[in-house]
């Protein structure tokens, strides 16, 4: 839901593990396309600076800044005694979902969908060359998995058998870097195609209907990554990782998207951390949005950010690993299952899966 972005990768095409949602780890942050440039040491903003920021709710920027200072004082770094490691040898764990009392997640480094039943982790499905990024159960009883490397949407039966995949939209156009998945209330699924990353504005969003049709519903996106529906189904939020922002669409009755606008720029919340980008996105029952972060450097570890409907920072969560590209809510949303990486610059991208209290 992280080229999850991301969710950190892009040393070479996804075969090297990272192209799917970001530019090279050692490359400078891409400042093209509507990003806010900044000096090496940002100057203190004045009144005019606030007025120029083109983010949704410009009138709230001052409150955001004050909220950031307050939230940082209340940062919820899970205490060692609170954090439980449920997989200490995950290879680029991503795109998780809690389903029928079990945790399903992918391991890009192993090419698997892995399932944790509360006691052990077992392989549910494996396909060489897929490059899995996220997994999601559907209303038909099967699972969908985004295959970043093979540019397809894999289909898996309830008992783990491989079904015919989706590899193009209804117009016959191939996908480019399928990344994350988000269900809607009508039994369909939205997913992102991240494109090739870097400066190219070549990413897209798609909708898979209950009838199996796949149509492109948004284009001209930059490194599209995590996405999530609002609780009322009226809006879709989508992360443009390399632009360091979350954008918002209105969802139409035919599932098309319009009225694109910026919901949140992470630069506004953390102006001194330009190398930590948004990855997976989730929304809890209260309407609070959780945003996973993928750093380009171990010197600036990521967090999980929690913001309200007005994009105001409420709190942050962190675990002992530096990168937290994606996560899933557990039962009753009282815990988070966090997909984390300790090794962010080379295969097989060692990391862990954590169970963390969500208080």
Image: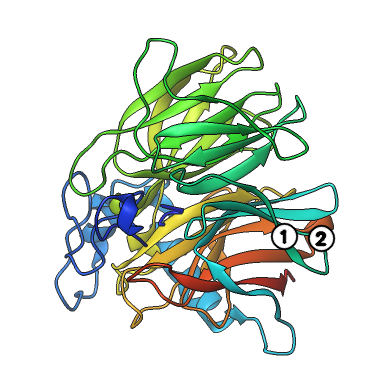
Q: Name the residue: 52% across, 58% down.
A: 110
Residues at marks 2 and 1 touching, judged by CB atoms closer than 8 Å: yes
Residue 271, horizontal then vertical, whole percent: 31, 69
Q: Quadrant of residue 60?
A: bottom left
Q: Name the residue under label 2.
A: 117
Residue 292, horizontal then vertical, whole percent: 51, 61
Crowd around label 1: few <14 · some 14–19 · many ≥20 (10 Å): few
Q: Quadrant of residue 335?
A: bottom right
Of residue 288 and residue 206, the one placed in the foreground of this image is 206
Above or below, 227 relative to 184: below
Of residue 17 and residue 274, the one placed in the foreground of this image is 17
Residue 1 seen from this side: no
Q: Name the residue: 70% across, 23% down.
A: 187
Disc marking residue 122 = 1
Q: Distance between the residues labelled 2 and 1?
A: 8 Å
Relative side of 109 to 228, left or right? left
Above or below, 115 relative to 253: below
Crowd around label 2: few <14 · some 14–19 · many ≥20 (10 Å): few
Relative side of 218 to 86, left or right? left
Of residue 233 and residue 326, the one placed in the foreground of this image is 326
Residue 175, horizontal then vertical, whole percent: 37, 28
Relative side of 308 to 223, left or right? right
Residue 95, horizontal then vertical, whole percent: 57, 51
Q: In which quarter of the image is residue 343?
A: bottom left
Q: In which quarter of the image is the C terminus?
A: bottom right
Above or below, 21 relative to 159: below
Which of the two marks, 2 or 1, is nearer to us in this view?
1
| SS for callout 2 | loop
Of residue 32 and residue 116, the one placed in the foreground of this image is 116
């Amino acid at each position: 839901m992280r080229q999850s972005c991301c969710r950190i990768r892009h040393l070479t095409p996804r075969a090297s593990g990272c192209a799917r949602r970001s530019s090279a780890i050692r490359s400078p942050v891409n400042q093209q396309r509507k990003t806010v440039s900044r000096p090496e040491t940002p100057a203190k903003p004045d009144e005019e600076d606030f007025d120029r920021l083109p983010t949704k709710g410009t009138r709230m920027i001052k409150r955001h800044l004050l909220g950031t200072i307050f939230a940082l004082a209340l940062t919820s770094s899970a205490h060692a005694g609170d954090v439980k490691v449920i997989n200490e040898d995950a290879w680029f764990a991503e795109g998780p979902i809690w389903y029928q009392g079990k945790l399903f997640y992918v391991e890009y480094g192993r090419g698997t969908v892995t399932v944790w039943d509360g006691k052990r982790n077992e392989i549910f499905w494996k396909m060489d060359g897929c490059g899995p990024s996220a997994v999601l159960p559907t209303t038909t009883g099967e699972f969908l998995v985004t295959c970043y490397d093979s540019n397809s949407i894999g289909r898996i039966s309830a008992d783990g058998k491989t079904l015919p995949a989706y590899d193009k939209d209804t117009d016959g156009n191939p996908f480019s870097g399928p990344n994350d998945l988000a269900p809607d209330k009508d039994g369909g699924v939205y997913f992102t195609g991240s494109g090739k990353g870097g400066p190219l504005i070549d990413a897209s969003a798609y909708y898979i209907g209950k009838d199996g049709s796949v149509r492109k519903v948004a284009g001209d996106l930059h490194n599209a990554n995590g996405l999530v529906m609002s609780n009322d189904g009226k809006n879709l939020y989508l992360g443009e990782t390399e632009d360091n922002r979350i954008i918002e669409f209105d969802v139409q009755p035919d599932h098309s998207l319009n009225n694109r606008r910026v919901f949140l720029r992470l630069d506004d919340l953390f102006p001194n951390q330009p190398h930590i980008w948004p990855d997976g996105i989730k929304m809890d029952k209260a309407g609070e949005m959780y945003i996973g972060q993928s750093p380009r450097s171990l010197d600036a570890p990521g967090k999980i950010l929690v913001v309200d409907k007005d994009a105001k920072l409420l709190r942050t969560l962190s675990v002992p690993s530096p990168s937290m590209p994606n996560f899933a809510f557990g039962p009753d949303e009282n815990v988070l299952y966090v997909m984390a990486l300790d090794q962010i610059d080379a295969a097989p991208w060692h990391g862990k899966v954590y169970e963390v209290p969500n208080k």
